[in-house]
Image (cartoon, rainbow, N blue to C red):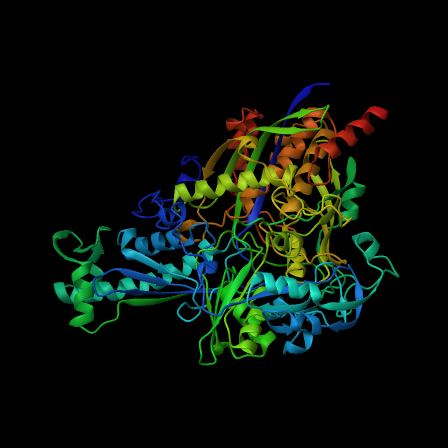
């Protein structure tokens, strides 16, 4: 790695003692010698193991649940169903007033994706819990499922989630989050070329080294200590408090070093049910995802579909950009309404375009609920935007890097979401990339600056 | 049939934090009797090194070496509220909270030192080595060790501080979408060079040259580990990863690392990282959040390089050999 101090030198003072120094990490020796403690390194006497009975169907009504055989299985201490969960229907972003509550801790009457938790089994050993889970009998009536966002949005599609009543999230702005800037249709009408293209992605796993989990210990004083690898301590505590209808002062969350998160550990899935298990049995409870659960049960990055329509001039100026983004939330909201909204705030990318129209939809389908992941709401959008930029450049016979210089945002430029640009540095990144990759561009581009014109 | 070479470019920006949700973080700082400093947070270190960077920020602000600072994180009984470690917000949000707390603690520390030295606190400065000196008369000094002892046992002062950082939540305007998603943005430009085997559809990423603008590299070695890892993840997203290879079909989902594809050590591209620093106006010592954005530009850069190599557009991720071969076949039949 090289630090190129020549850029923006006028905005920086290099007079610091500790900042800017490549100090060795104090936690590295523990990591590389295997001495760092993770939550799962704890072991309490009498600790129970929790395993979930999961839906084998993508969409089904639950006619009945019979746990009698499972309860008789040797080593089983407790079997939990929806009726045991004090506030079973929840949604995590209710903490920032993004509702409605639309997800069940344990399925109640219905499952909406293959793998959804229906019954929790607590047993003396992991094996006993697993074996007993296989003995739980759930009588399902399979319902039509919808997997494709386009299909889900068609009239008459099976409704994935009754708490929404429609297969998309309803924002205060309507069926999508909107950005409107200038007159996009006039921009297309006056453009030398118009190009509309569609981009898509599939769900992606966070693949942390350490799978999601927690260990809960009753403290004997009505308090419960939850050792967890959540990425957000109070966010998880406060949601748990709602789900269990338990005052926050009864809960003590302890984290520590986490073996990778990437956004996959902000969903508040394992903690509430494990704490409930500890409360109802009076014993420590351990609930840790297997690798299979981490890959197919825990939320992935959402699949997205992005349609971009651009109007471009022969001289390289983009004069209009319309983006329609679709985020596949799966069966429940989790963080997806926020992610789709974040996308609306990110488009049309780091370019100054006078006419912009953005619609971003959060769509429900019968698949594993998606949620936050590194680059949430932006990563797939950037893939779409930057491939589109390449296509536009080639369409008008221009070098793709030079084409980006022509459109790059600079300090003071008004963005589509009506904030003036501050602290831009795209131009300088491209200048340095031009040098580093030996990708020459015209001298006028190398002379450009992100600073406001005339500044 | 041949191995064909191509290169592609992509340029991006990325917001720090989640202004659209509201994301406060708090920090507490106090000294021990012997002049070490404890930073207390509820923020989570995900392995990226948050504790180390908070220690350096606290040390810089108080004016002591980093090894005099201990960071206690991720305990809701002791640590004040933090929204969480996500949205590229940890360094920026918690860092600002630590600076505010450390400034308050530093002020008490200087006041105690001023009483011991019988001067005004405003005439004192720290040397960064654990001592407090009178400006212009450095022979008149006191160690922070002695100041802390005095505060604890003689003067009855708590060398401590409280820090809070909050950017008010931005609510998007319904009709126009006017909003403030972030107060600062990191930037990147990546050039990727690939080889594509037009017989097998296999892509080899030869080089990635990443230029990242991140505000300020608070610890250059830690910045490097994050940017190199992010660059690898971007390539992995471009070419390999998905839990549902035939999305929207639900079948064939990987359940372990044998089935879920990621590049191994032998697939790593030659990676170059160049960092520019344009300090952000509200960042801790100018830092922005580079955690997420560093994995984004490689994806389109690789996609564009594949097109440059073999003349087909794969607009669906991941760019698998199957998709490339199908596109080449369609191209040949047109």
Residue most toward the right? A156
Relative image position of residue A390 (x, y in whole percent): 68, 33
Residue most toward the top? B1
Does residue A4 appear to the left or right of B257 in the view shown?
left
Identify which residue, B175 or B285, lies in the foreground.
B285
Residue A277 visible: yes
Does residue A279 appear to the left or right of A324 in the view shown?
left
Residue at image position (73%, 18%) is: B1
Does residue A151 appear to the left or right of B238 in the view shown?
right
- State whether residue B212 is above or below residue B33: above
- State whether residue A30 is above or below residue A111: above
Relative image position of residue B195 (x, y in whole percent): 64, 25
Residue at image position (50%, 70%) is: A284
Residue A89 visible: no
Residue at image position (73%, 23%) is: B199
Identify which residue, B76 or A350, lies in the foreground.
B76
- Quarter holding the N terminus of chain A? top left
Q: How many marks?
A: 0
- State whether residue B120 is above or below residue A205: below
Relative image position of residue A185 (x, y in whole percent): 79, 47
Identify which residue, A111 or A434, lies in the foreground.
A111
What is the quadrant of residue B59 in the picture?
bottom left
What is the quadrant of residue A318 in the picture?
top right
Identify which residue, A297 or B230, lies in the foreground.
A297
């Amino acid at each position: 790695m090289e630090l190129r101090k020549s850029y923006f030198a006028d905005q920086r003072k290099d007079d610091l003692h500790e900042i800017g120094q490549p100090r060795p990490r104090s936690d590295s020796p523990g990591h590389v010698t295997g001495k760092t403690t993770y939550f799962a390194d704890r072991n309490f006497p009498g600790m129970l193991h929790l395993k979930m009975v999961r839906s084998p169907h993508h969409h089904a009504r639950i006619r009945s649940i019979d746990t009698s055989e499972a309860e008789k299985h040797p080593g089983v201490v407790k079997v939990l169903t929806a009726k045991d969960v004090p506030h079973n229907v929840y949604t995590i972003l209710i903490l920032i007033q993004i509702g409605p509550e639309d997800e069940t801790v344990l399925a109640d009457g219905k499952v909406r994706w293959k793998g959804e938790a229906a019954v929790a089994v607590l047993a003396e050993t992991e094996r006993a819990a697993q074996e007993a889970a296989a003995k739980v009998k759930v009588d399902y009536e399979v319902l039509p499922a919808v997997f494709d966002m386009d299909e889900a949005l068609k009239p008459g599609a099976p409704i994935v989630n009754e708490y929404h009543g429609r297969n998309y999230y309803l924002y205060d702005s309507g069926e999508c989050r909107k950005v409107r800037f200038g007159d996009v249709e006039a921009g297309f009408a006056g453009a030398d070329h118009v190009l509309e293209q569609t981009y898509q992605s599939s769900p992606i796993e966070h693949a942390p080294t350490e799978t999601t989990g927690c260990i809960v210990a009753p403290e004997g004083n009505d308090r419960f200590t939850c050792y967890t690898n959540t990425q957000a301590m109070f966010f998880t505590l406060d949601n748990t408090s709602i789900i269990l209808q338990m005052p926050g002062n009864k809960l003590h969350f302890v984290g520590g070093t986490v073996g990778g998160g990437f956004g996959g550990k902000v969903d508040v899935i394992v903690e509430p049910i494990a704490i409930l298990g500890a409360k109802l049995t009076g014993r420590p409870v351990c609930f840790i995802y297997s690798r299979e659960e981490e890959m197919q049960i825990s939320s992935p990055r959402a699949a997205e579909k992005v349609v971009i329509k651009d109007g471009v001039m022969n001289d390289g100026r983009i004069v209009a950009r319309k983006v329609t983004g679709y985020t596949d939330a799966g069966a429940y909201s989790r963080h997806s309404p926020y992610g789709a909204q974040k996308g609306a705030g990110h488009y049309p990318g780091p370019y100054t375009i006078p006419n912009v129209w953005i619609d971003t939809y959060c769509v429900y389908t019968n698949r594993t609920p998606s949620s936050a992941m590194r680059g949430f709401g932006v990563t797939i959008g950037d893939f779409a935007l930057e491939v589109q930029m390449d296509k536009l450049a080639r369409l008008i016979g221009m070098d793709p890097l030079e084409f980006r210089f022509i459109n790059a945002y600079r300090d003071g430029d008004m963005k589509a979401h009506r904030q003036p640009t501050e602290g831009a540095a795209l131009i300088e990144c491209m200048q340095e990339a031009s040098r580093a990759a030996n990708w020459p561009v015209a001298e006028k581009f190398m002379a450009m600056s992100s600073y406001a014109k005339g500044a | 049939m041949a191995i064909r070479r191509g290169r592609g470019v992509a340029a991006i920006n990325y917001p720090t934090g989640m202004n659209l949700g509201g994301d406060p973080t708090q920090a507490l700082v106090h000294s021990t009797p012997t002049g070490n400093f404890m930073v207390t947070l509820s923020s989570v270190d995900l392995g990226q090194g948050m504790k180390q960077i908070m220690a350096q920020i606290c040390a810089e602000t108080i004016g002591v070496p980093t090894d005099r600072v201990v960071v206690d994180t991720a305990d809701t009984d002791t640590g004040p509220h933090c929204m969480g470690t996500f949205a590229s917000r940890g360094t920026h949000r918690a860092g600002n909270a630590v600076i505010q707390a450390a400034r308050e603690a530093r002020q008490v520390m200087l006041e105690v030192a001023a009483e011991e030295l019988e001067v005004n606190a405003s005439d004192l400065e720290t040397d960064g080595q654990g001592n407090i000196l009178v400006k212009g008369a450095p022979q008149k000094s006191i160690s922070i060790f002695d100041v802390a002892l005095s505060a604890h046992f003689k003067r009855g002062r708590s060398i401590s501080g409280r820090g809070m950082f909050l950017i008010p939540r931005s609510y998007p305007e319904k009709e126009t979408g006017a909003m403030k998603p972030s107060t600062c943005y990191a930037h990147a430009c990546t050039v990727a060079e690939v080889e594509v085997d037009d017989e097998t559809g296999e892509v080899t990423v030869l080089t990635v040259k990443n230029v990242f603008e991140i505000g300020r590299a608070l610890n250059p070695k830690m910045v490097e580990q994050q940017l190199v890892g992010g660059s690898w993840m971007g390539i992995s997203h471009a070419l390999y990863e998905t839990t549902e290879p035939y999305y929207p079909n639900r079948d064939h989902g990987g359940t372990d690392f044998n089935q879920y594809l990621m590049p191994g050590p032998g697939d790593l591209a030659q990676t170059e990282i160049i960092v520019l620093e344009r300090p952000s106006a509200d960042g801790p010592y100018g830092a922005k959040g580079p955690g997420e954005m560093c994995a984004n530009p490689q994806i389109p850069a690789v996609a564009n390089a594949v097109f440059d190599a073999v003349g087909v557009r794969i607009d669906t991720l991941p760019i698998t050999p199957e998709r490339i071969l199908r596109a080449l076949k369609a191209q040949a039949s047109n």
